[in-house]
Image (cartoon, grey):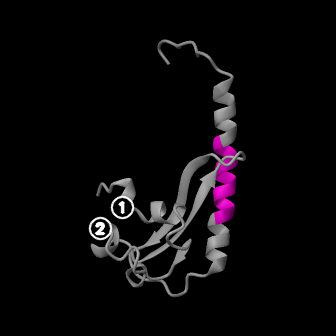
Amino acid sequence: MRVPLVDTICRQMVMGRVPRRIPDTRAEPSIADLPAVAGGGIGAYVGVPVTAPDGTPFGTLCCLSERPRPDVGEEDVELVETLGVLLADHLQRVADRADGVTALPRVSGA
């Protein structure tokens, strides 16, 4: 299913319109009408922004459940935040290495 960015829970979270933890997406009025929620595809959500050290956004990292999950707690958000920091660090290292590379020689037959 392709969903326009404007219709995503992650976008709503980054914009500050919804919390990082939503145990029951259908009970959250600001997103209940989004296609992925209204269509029954996402019942619970935990997501965090993934940013570079200078604050530049890389994107988001999220975990979804097809069903509501009343047991989703702050410890789940903390875990996803930790993974997001690790991911941001890795992406920044990859970007830093790429900045130093102007062109890689092609290897034929590899």
Residue for point 33% across, 68% down: 36
Instruction: Give whichever of 26, 67 is nearer the camera.
Output: 26
Q: Which residues are magenta?
A: 81-91
Residue for point 29% across, 67% down: 35
Q: Is residue 81 above or below residue 94?
A: below
Q: Quadrant of residue 30?
A: bottom left
Tags 2 and 1 in contact by the CB under 8 Å rule?
yes
Q: Can you say which quadrant of the picture contains the N terminus?
A: bottom left
Q: Is residue 97 above or below residue 70?
A: above
Q: With 103 as the anchor, is 9 left or right in this view? A: left
Q: Quadrant of residue 80?
A: bottom right
Residue 83 drawn in magenta:
yes
**Badge 1, how many Cα within 10 Å: few under 14, some, many 20+?**
some
Residue 7 image label = 1
Residue 35 image label = 2
Q: Cα distance, mark 2 to mark 1? A: 7 Å
At mark 2, the secondary structure is: helix
Q: With 20 as the anchor, is 97 left or right in this view? A: right
* Name of the residue lying farthest toward the bottom: 70
In this rendering, the count of numbered labels is 2
| Amino acid bearing label 2 | Pro
Disc with the residue nearer the chain's start (2 vs 1): 1
